[in-house]
Image (cartoon, rainbow, N blue to C red):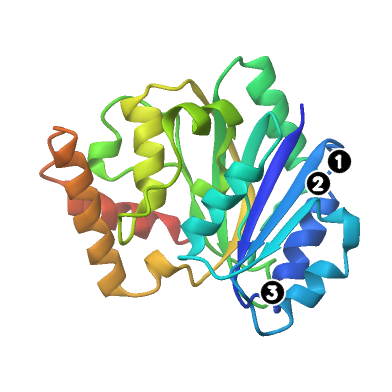
Amino acid sequence: MKVSIITPVLNGCATIEDTIKSILGQSHKEIEHIVIDGGSKDGTVDIVKSYGSKITKFISEPDKGIYDAMNKGIKLASGDIIGILNADDIYAGTSVVGTMAKAISEKKVDACYSDLVYVDRINTDIIVRHWKSCEYREGLFKKGWMPPHPTFFAKRYVYEKYGHFDLSLPIALDYEILFRFMEKSKIKTHYIPEAMVRMRLGGYSNNSIRNIIKQNIVIMKILRENKIGVSPFFFYSKIAEKIKQFR
């Protein structure tokens, strides 16, 4: 199965090469790597261009943010399966893409996801937090649960049928799309209990208390708009999940 990997980037010259090498090093041969740059000014474009045809599709133009870039990549994707790997993240091994594609095929599911580890920005061998997910079951999303988005691989038709990222939201777009796919549309998923992605610390949604609070408010709004009652333990569950990630 052909897999499209989308990498959104803006001024990521310090890490984009690690991401590219991580994808090029995958044992799965049918990979299409799509890089969507938001108009970088720091040398990112030169790094991407230095890989020539190894980057299947490359666009560099102003956009409305990381999720707009992801949407552009999804529209360009021609693979049977779509995965998204941000410009400061790497796969935890060389068999990640192949493992995900095989699981989707053999388990006859629409999507697959796994665990994720947060790592030091300089030394990616240093694990700071471990995001351990679980098999999806109905009701988890109202507790604020979601699978780690960078580990989420889905068949392309899932995006074609159920839509792309909702750019009208200020934050929590990854939560909303996964809620829409898994809880609302009931796609079939499979969970692999292994850390498949190494994410450098410093993501937009998690880099300040203000953003964490803002994200949770948006999540509660999404749930209420879909007539799903919010668990009275919502905030406690979210805090407990964060605490459990440290090791």
Q: Residue furthest bottom?
A: 42
Report crowding for label 2: few under 14, some 14 to 19, many 20 or more residues within 10 A (C-alpha). Answer: some
Of the numbered discs 3 and 1, the one sitting upstream in the chain is 1
Q: Amino acid at mark 1?
A: Ser
* Mark pair 3, 1: CA separation: 24 Å
Of the numbered discs 2 and 1, the one sitting upstream in the chain is 1
Q: Is 155 on the left or on the right of 144, as rendered?
A: right
Give the image location of residue 92, x and y in percent: 70, 52
Residue on which the image places disc 1: 27
Q: Which mark is residue 123?
A: 3
Q: Secondary structure at mark 3?
A: loop
Of the numbered discs 2 and 3, the one sitting upstream in the chain is 2
* Mark pair 2, 1: CA separation: 6 Å
Report crowding for label 1: few under 14, some 14 to 19, many 20 or more residues within 10 A (C-alpha). Answer: some
Q: Is 208 on the left or on the right of 81, as rendered?
A: left
Q: Which quadrant holds residue 170?
A: bottom left
Q: Is 12 on the left or on the right of 71, as rendered?
A: right
Q: Secondary structure at mark 1?
A: loop
Q: Amino acid at mark 3?
A: Asn
Residue on which the image places disc 2: 94
Please name whichever residue, 245 or 48, is drawn nearer the observer in this view of the structure: 48
Give the image location of residue 156, x and y in percent: 60, 31
Give the image location of residue 110, x and y in percent: 55, 23
Q: Which quadrant holds residue 235?
A: bottom left
* Mark pair 2, 3: CA separation: 18 Å
Q: Secondary structure at mark 2?
A: loop
Q: Amino acid at mark 2?
A: Thr
